[in-house]
Amino acid sequence: SQKIEQNSEALNIQEGKTATLTCNYTNYSPAYLQWYRQDPGRGPVFLLLIRENEKEKRKERLKVTFDTTLKQSLFHITASQPADSATYLCAPCESWGKLQFGAGTQVVVTP
Amino acid sequence: DTAVSQTPKYLVTQMGNDKSIKCEQNLGHDTMYWYKQDSKKFLKIMFSYNNKELIINETVPNRFSPKSPDKAHLNLHINSLELGDSAVYFCASSQRGPRRGSDNEKLFFGSGTQLSVL
């Protein structure tokens, strides 16, 4: 069966450091992958999309990589700030209209 | 101004009751979705509509029935509520359904409806 695995343990990181989150998937052949941020009591908010033919994508302090051989995407937050504290969800997309999400990794950035 | 709005935000009800959750988007999007987020925080797709046509219907009990009166609205009706239905339900929309990996396919979510069945 298809699985999307993200580290279930919270990532505690000091302000200014780089946070790296992992998304592994099995029994998927996604054409692309999206990353979202979710704050408590809110819906997810889109951050970045990376296609299978793109190795890396950047947006401000965010960077995403996509390795279809390893079946893995890495999400980096550089120069992290307390405002970056949230849960980050990855969502590989394979078939039309069906975006499935991982359970997310909580990031806690302390001053 | 809210792009995707769903009501109510909280819904507490007894087992066996029937309830509805409403969703509206003012983004002019063609595709709308219902997702369920359980206690383990997995977001699972339930339904997807494109221009009022049902295009995704996951393995969801037939007690759940979506209705799309027009492409800006997608409501969710739940019959005979069970304890296991307790979760947060999110409505979402996108300009186009996920397919080719363009930014038109990113989802905009509502703020969720927390359903508690007692």
Image (cartoon, coloured by chain):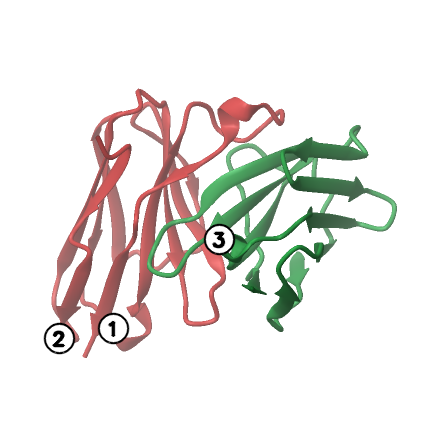
Chain colours: A green, B red
Identify the image quadrant of the C terminus of chain B: bottom left
Q: Secondary structure at mark 1?
A: loop
Q: Secondary structure at mark 3?
A: helix
Q: Residue A61: x percent and y percent? A: 64, 40
Is residue B12 something one can see in this rendering?
yes
Q: Secondary structure at mark 2?
A: loop
Real-space Cα separation, disc 1 to disc 3, in angstroms: 38 Å
Residue at label 3?
A83
Tell me, yes or no, whether the two marked residues, 1 and 3, touch with CB atoms within 8 Å: no
Q: Is residue A106 left or right of residue B92?
A: right
Mark 3 packing: few (<14 Cα in 10 Å), some, or many (20+)?
few
On screen, residue A99 versus residue B63, left or right, reads right
| On-image quarter of the N terminus of chain B | top left
In this view, the residue in front, B92 or B44, is B92
- Badge 1 crowding class, 10 Å Cα cut-off, few under 14, some 14 to 19, many 20 or more, is some
User: According to the image, label 1 marks what residue?
Assistant: B82
Instruction: Name the quadrant containing residue B116.
Output: bottom left
Residue at the top extreme? Answer: B28
B30 above or below A24? above
Q: Quadrant of residue A30?
A: top right
